[in-house]
Amino acid sequence: MLTRFLVAAAALVSAASAQLTITNPSSDSWWVAQSSNTLAWTCNTSPYSNFTILLANSNPSVLVQPIAIIAIQENYDCSETITQQQSTQPAATGYTVLFANPLNSTDVYATSETFEIKALGSSYPATSSSSSPSGTSGSSSPSSTSTTGGALAQYIPAGAGMALALAMGLVVA
Ligand SMILES: *[C@@H]1O[C@H](CO)[C@@H](O)[C@H](O)[C@H]1NC(C)=O
Ligand SMILES: *[C@@H]1O[C@H](CO)[C@@H](O)[C@H](O)[C@H]1NC(C)=O
């Protein structure tokens, strides 16, 4: 009975972890050129504590290779406003945002849906979190203590979870 519960719990944990998804931009949530745009991701389920953010385009005449727009982004920020200084890319379709290993940018953790950068002056997507929503961008910094604890828990493989957690003294009886 207990075993079955633990297996189910472990399965849930494993389904919820190791999941980093870029939620904005997306196929129906574009960016606007030479403007501030919002980048957002599933920080709560991300197994990574930081990453490099790159911009790519499927058309080599727009971008020959991915370019880094943020060298090190902390996962706990959950979203970031990309300024026109960080991304000076022209209006075009076929863009993707990549989150990659800061030590090896070909080790890609997550890729956004293909999205469009529309011309300067275009309206932002209706439902979007584009422009600069207060309170959602990088200003809040939860204590690194809790972030570290959460990140550590995410790293524990499902099968070994309880034993490892006990061994590491993470489980308070
Ligand atoms: C990024 O995360 C790794 C491991 O998760 C850590 O070792 C490294 O110090 C972090 N780098 C920065 C710049 O925060
Ligand atoms: C970088 O990551 C790629 C993809 O995961 C891998 O094939 C390659 O060996 C890595 N390079 C280094 C130097 O670790």
Image: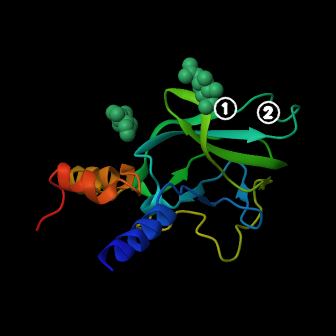
Can see residue 105? yes
Tell me: residue 38, above or below residue 60: below
Q: Nearer the viewer, residue 112 or 35?
A: 112
Q: Is residue 34 left or right of residue 156?
A: right
Q: Percent x, y for residue 22?
A: 60, 57
Residue type, label 2? Leu
Q: Is residue 89 left or right of residue 85?
A: right
Tell me: residue 105, above or below residue 157: above
Taking the spot 17% from the left edge, 62% from the top edge, the residue there is 171
Screen quadrant of the N terminus: bottom left
Q: Are marks 1 and 2 in contact (CB under 8 Å)?
A: yes
Taking the spot 40% from the left edge, 46% from the top edge, the residue there is 49
The numbered disc on residue 63 is 2
Taking the spot 70% from the left edge, 76% from the top edge, the residue there is 126
Mark 2, other Cα within 10 Å: few <14 / some 14–19 / many ≥20: some
Can see residue 89? no
Q: Percent x, y for residue 90?
A: 78, 42
Question: Could you tell me how far apart the alpha carbons at marks 1 and 2 are, in whole angstroms?
Answer: 8 Å
- Quick check: which quadrant has ligand 2? top right
Give the secondary structure at mark 1: strand
Q: Nearer the viewer, residue 120 or 117?
A: 117
Residue type, label 1? Ile
Q: Percent x, y for residue 98?
A: 64, 43
Q: Nearer the viewer, residue 121 or 20?
A: 20
The numbered disc on residue 67 is 1
